[in-house]
Every structure is written in C-alpha cells, then in structure tokens.
C-alpha cells in the first residue's frame, strides 16, 4: 500500500433495518358483566364504555337528556361458540341484544384523554360520513373521552342530537340505509385513539383533580312482552335531545397515527338472545309516559369551558324511525304493560374480546 494512503471503512447505512419494524401497541379489549345484568367494555386502562338503556323520547319537540335505566348486557363473540353467525366471527367484537325501536345511549369513563370514533353501520355518528381510518379536526369526526361523558344520538344541529333508536335492517329506517346504497351491515363500531407520549405528558402536567357528581338512577329495569323480529339490527334516528358534542382541545399532531383499539358491537334482536347465548331474554325500559307519570327526573349537562361542534347537514336530513315505520312515537306501543323486574346476578370475570381489522 502506498505511503500516506488512508483507508476509510465503509459507512453503515443509517436507514438499514436492525430488526423487525416495531408495530404500534394495541390496547387489550375486555367485556365484563356487572350486577343487574349489564356489561362494560374496557379498552385497556384507557376508557370504559357502556351502552345504557333509556327512554325513547318523543319525535316531536326538543327533549332533555333521558335517564340511564341500567346497562345493556354484552357478550364476547367467541364465547358464543358455533352459535355465532359468520358475520360475527369475521368481525369479532361483542354482541348486544336490543328490541325493535328501543333507544340507547353510550357512556364513557376515560382515565386519560382518548379520541373515540363512533359509527353505526360504518357511518360516523357525528358527521354522517363513512367511518374513516383517520381523525379529522376541522370537520371533527370523534369525541374526547375526558370531556364527553355521554353520547345520546346523531349530531344534527347545534346543541342537538337525534336519539339512537334500534331498527331492523331491511326496513329502510336505519341511518346507514338512508345514506348508502351498499348492503347494510348494522351494529355499532368503536375506534379509540391515544395521545402521543409527549402530548399525554403535557396533559398530565396541567391537571388538577376534580370530581363531577352526575345524577343517575341505577339498577332499574323494566320488562315487556316479546316481539317477533329478525336477528340483525342497526341504528336509526329518533327524537331531538339537547346535547352538545365538544370540540377537541388537542392538535392533530397530539394523537398517535394508528388507533389503539377497534370494537364491533353486533346488535341482535333481543328475542334471539336465549338461542344465541343460553341466557334469559333481557327486559327493556319503561315508557317515557310511565316514567313521567312516576315523577322521575330528566337531565341536562353543560360545560361552559368547551365549544360545541357543528351539526351535520347529512344527518339533519335523515328521516326518523317513526317517519319511516309509522306508529306511536312515544314508546307506548313498544312497551305494553311494563312491569318492574330486578336482576341480582354476580359480576363475571372479564372476557377477552377478539378485535380483527374490519376496516
């Protein structure tokens, strides 16, 4: 080798992979049975979600927030064995019984801020658009778990939502059937996104502890005569309820690029519950008329520190279940001879929920 010749070793490529690409962490999903026959979905230690039985409000006029009358039961699809349908097996998740024209609302108890997308039949309940694989901020398509304790319906106007009301697929009363020409899929879809580690650290640094006492009536259920219905159910629009969906205080860059969990909630006609699970057919809430006659309260919730998102012109144009199917809109025809019943079963161990990608 010539004198003063310098040998330089080849540089290692900065882009060369040193191992398998690290996949985003997914939060485990479990469903746990609680007392009084209800169940709770837990997304890791991020947020607990329940589906609440409630009154079906009138489709005329503007109503206050209806009460919670107990949680719906939920079961992991895999616990059904060979009784699960092919669609249930393909999408995983949980199954929930609900009667035709029965109303519901969702409750969120978040430990840290999470972005939650809610779809019905793969239609966003806030915008009416197809449920997307990303978070939008200008036309917000999610709610934030720590600021939004409840969601009662589809966002139609400023300060108002149209109540979530169950309807059979094929009758044309669900929101998805009115907004899409595709074959309806029904159910409720939940997608949860976490903050980045940096954004979460900033949020924790500025928190002060507070307790918000929310009025509730727990452990009350009512029974009705069974109805003859088909298996698959979707979600239609009911009466107007005073409720705001609060705008996110977080920037787009504060959220992780991939969701931490997706859960498909299959809605099945309640009259099929025994055949599907081997458990007694569930009861349903009392009518709005009977509830009012009993002197029980209605509720309101207002947060002056947050701004309501815009209503959706797409959802504002959908017909209500009553307009499509006809009949009495105050729930009286759905709940003949309602009678108080009690369920005092013990809590069960959590069931792990399989959540394959369905998007």
Image (tube, helix red, strand yellow):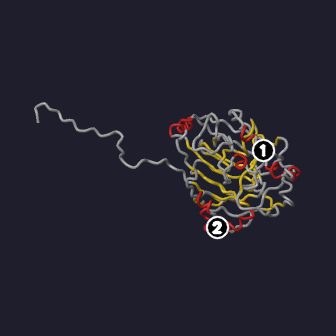
Q: Secondary structure at mark 1?
A: loop
Camera-nearest residue between 109 and 59: 59
Q: Is residue 301 above or below residue 184?
A: above
Left or right of residue 354, residue 167 in this image: right
For residue 65, the mark is 1
* Residue 16 drawn at (x, y percent): 35, 43
* Residue 286 drawn at (x, y percent): 82, 55
N-terminal label among 1 and 2 = 1
Q: How many marks?
A: 2
Residue at position x 64%, y 50% in the image:
189
Camera-nearest residue between 160 and 198: 160
Task: Using the rendered view, name the quadrant where residue 140 is placed.
Answer: top right
For residue 173, the mark is none
Q: Are the two marked residues, 1 and 2, in contact with CB atoms closer than 8 angstroms?
A: no
Task: Using the rendered view, name the quadrant where residue 214 is placed.
Answer: top right
Q: Quadrant of the N terminus?
A: top left
Left or right of residue 324, residue 357 in this image: left
Q: Is residue 1 above or below residue 297?
A: above
Camera-nearest residue between 320 and 301: 320
- Residue 115 visible? The answer is yes
Residue at position x 80%, y 64% in the image:
226
* Residue at the limit of the structure toward the front, as seen here: 181
* Residue at the limit of the structure toward the right, as seen here: 293
Residue at position x 86%, y 55% in the image:
332
Q: Secondary structure at mark 2?
A: helix
**Circle 2 Cα neighbour tier, 10 Å, few/some/many (<14 / 14–19 / ≥20):** some
């Amino acid at each position: 080798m010539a004198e003063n010749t310098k040998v330089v070793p080849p540089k290692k490529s900065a882009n060369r992979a040193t191992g398998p690409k690290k996949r985003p962490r997914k939060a485990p999903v479990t469903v746990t049975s609680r007392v009084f026959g209800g169940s709770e979905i837990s997304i890791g230690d991020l947020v607990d979600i329940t589906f609440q039985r409630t009154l079906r409000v009138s489709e005329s006029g503007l109503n206050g927030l209806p009460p919670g009358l107990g949680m719906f039961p939920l079961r992991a699809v895999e616990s059904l064995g060979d009784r699960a349908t092919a669609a249930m097996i393909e999408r995983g998740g949980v199954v929930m019984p609900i009667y035709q024209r029965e109303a519901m609302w969702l409750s969120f108890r978040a430990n840290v801020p999470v972005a939650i997308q809610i779809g019905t039949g793969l239609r966003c309940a806030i915008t009416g658009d197809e449920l997307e694989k990303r978070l939008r901020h200008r036309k917000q398509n999610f709610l934030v778990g720590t600021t939004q304790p409840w969601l009662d319906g589809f966002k139609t106007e400023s300060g108002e939502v149209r109540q979530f009301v169950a309807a059979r697929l094929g009758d044309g009363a669900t929101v998805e059937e009115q907004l899409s020409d595709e074959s309806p899929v029904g159910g409720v879809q939940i997608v949860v996104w976490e903050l980045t580690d940096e954004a979460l650290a900033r949020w924790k640094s500025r928190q002060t502890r507070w307790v918000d006492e929310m009025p509730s009536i727990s452990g009350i259920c009512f029974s009705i005569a069974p109805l003859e219905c088909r298996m698959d159910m979707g979600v239609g629009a009911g009466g107007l309820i005073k409720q705001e969906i609060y705008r996110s205080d977080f920037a787009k860059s504060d959220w992780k690029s991939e969701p931490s969990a997706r859960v498909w909630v299959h809605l099945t006609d309640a009259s099929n519950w025994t055949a599907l699970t081997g458990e007694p057919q569930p009861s349903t809430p009392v009518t709005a008329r009977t509830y009012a006659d009993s002197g029980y309260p209605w509720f309101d919730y207002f947060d002056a520190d947050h701004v309501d998102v815009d209503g959706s012109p797409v959802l504002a144009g959908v017909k209500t279940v009553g307009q499509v199917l006809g009949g009495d809109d105050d729930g009286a025809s759905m709940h003949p001879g309602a009678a108080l019943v009690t369920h005092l079963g013990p809590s069960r161990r959590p069931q792990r929920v399989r959540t394959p990608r369905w998007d």
